[in-house]
Amino acid sequence: MTLLHQDAPETTTEVVPATLRAARQTPTALWNDSADPTELGTAIREYGAVGATCNPVIALTCIKQDPGTWVPRLRALAAEHPTAGENALGWLAVEELSRNAAKLLEPAFEASGGRNGRLSVQTDPRLHRDPEALVEQAVHFSQLAPNTIVKIPATKTGIEAIEEAAYRGVSINATVSFTVPQVVAVGAAIERALDRRAADGLPEQEFGHVVTLMGGRLDDWMKATVKRDHVMVDPGVLEWAGVAALKHAHRVFTERGYRSRVLSAAFRNHLQWSELVGGDLVVSPPFQWIKDINDDDVPFRTDAIDQPVDETTMRVLRTKVPDFNRAYEVDGMAVEEFERFGATVRTLRQFLDAAAQLDALVRDIIVPAV
């Protein structure tokens, strides 16, 4: 009797994206720095994203990229709210975009007990001088969905609003934040708010508070200052400023036992992900960065967060770039200085400009040119 040869069944090896491997192997959480539904859905399904962000810049981009959806929707909103101006209608669009994105994140929210699965909504940058207005809008945004987290700027005024909003039960994500002094001040404010809640017998829950440090925008400011001051340094050194600040901020939060997490945002290089893996923090790249990191299978170490930045790099940053020391040291700036730090001014102006552009876009839709 002749036995017919049968080929062994083929075995397939699952190709797991780098960010998903990191999420499975470490406490580092991946959020997607966009509320675009297509991008966010892909980031959740394929790359392990468990959070997302919406703000005037992102909303403006989403509407521009999908006019087939948003032009008729904004016209419908105008019909539903006949007395609303372009500013109010623009924010209704932001809220709708946010609610839709929050829905996609509900499974991660429930699975993590509220620690992740958060959709960040940014307060109107035009309110940056008014703490009471920031708090009121934060409370309103917190009611858009159970998993909403609200972004408030890490300025003196904003930190005052952050503490009060957190006390009232708003989940906080500090923004317009680039330095260790800022994130530590915000972390301390959130601790005070949580302690006040406990003292007043308010219910305890997982708020998922995060404190953003926009590492890439810190890098941008370092590059601007060396150009302004005609300082010659190896340009590669300047790619490490944000990473160094983020590592230091995470270390301080861990040592002090802060109940909020540091969040890495404003990506300019993959180091702002790969050098932070292993920490109990959040990394929030834009979708294209997430895709590129995974397409190129960027390597990472599961203990990267604990590895210090090269001593030579740190020495150059400390001796050649004075603003780096202000950004890196916990006491590098007083809270009164946050608002005038170069990166703060630049970013706040960009957010203000985006809000104005969103108004103009809505205006062109509801009052088209003839």
Image (cartoon, helix red, strand yellow):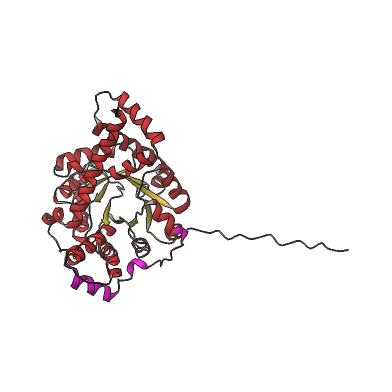
Instruction: Depth check: give the residue in front, 19 or 215.
Output: 215
**Residue 143 rendering spot, x and y as whole percentages:** 29, 37
Q: Quadrant of residue 343?
A: bottom left
Q: Quadrant of the N terminus?
A: bottom right
Residue range highlighted in magenta: 294-322
Instruction: Depth check: give the residue in front, 246 or 93.
Output: 93
The single residue placed furthest to the right in the displayed view is 1
**Residue 290 rendering spot, x and y as whole percentages:** 41, 55
**Residue 276 rendering spot, x and y as whole percentages:** 34, 63
Q: Quadrant of the C terminus?
A: top left
Height in image: 341 above or below 163?
below
Q: Which residue appears at 31% of the width and 38% of the height?
A: 94
Instruction: Depth check: give the residue in front, 130 or 188.
Output: 130
Q: Quadrant of residue 135?
A: top left
| The magenta stretch spans residue 315 | yes
Task: Count the numbered circles shown.
Answer: 0
**Residue 43 rendering spot, x and y as whole percentages:** 43, 50
Describe residue 286's horizontal placement relative to residue 250 as left or right.
right
Height in image: 85 above or below 257?
above
The single residue placed furthest to the front in the displayed view is 370
Describe residue 345's horizontal placement relative to residue 307 as left or right.
left
Height in image: 7 above or below 319?
above
Instruction: Depth check: give the residue in front, 238 or 98.
Output: 238
Q: Is residue 199 visible?
A: no
Q: Quadrant of residue 321?
A: bottom left
| The magenta stretch spans residue 57 | no
Q: Is residue 175 visible?
A: yes
Height in image: 240 above or below 19?
below
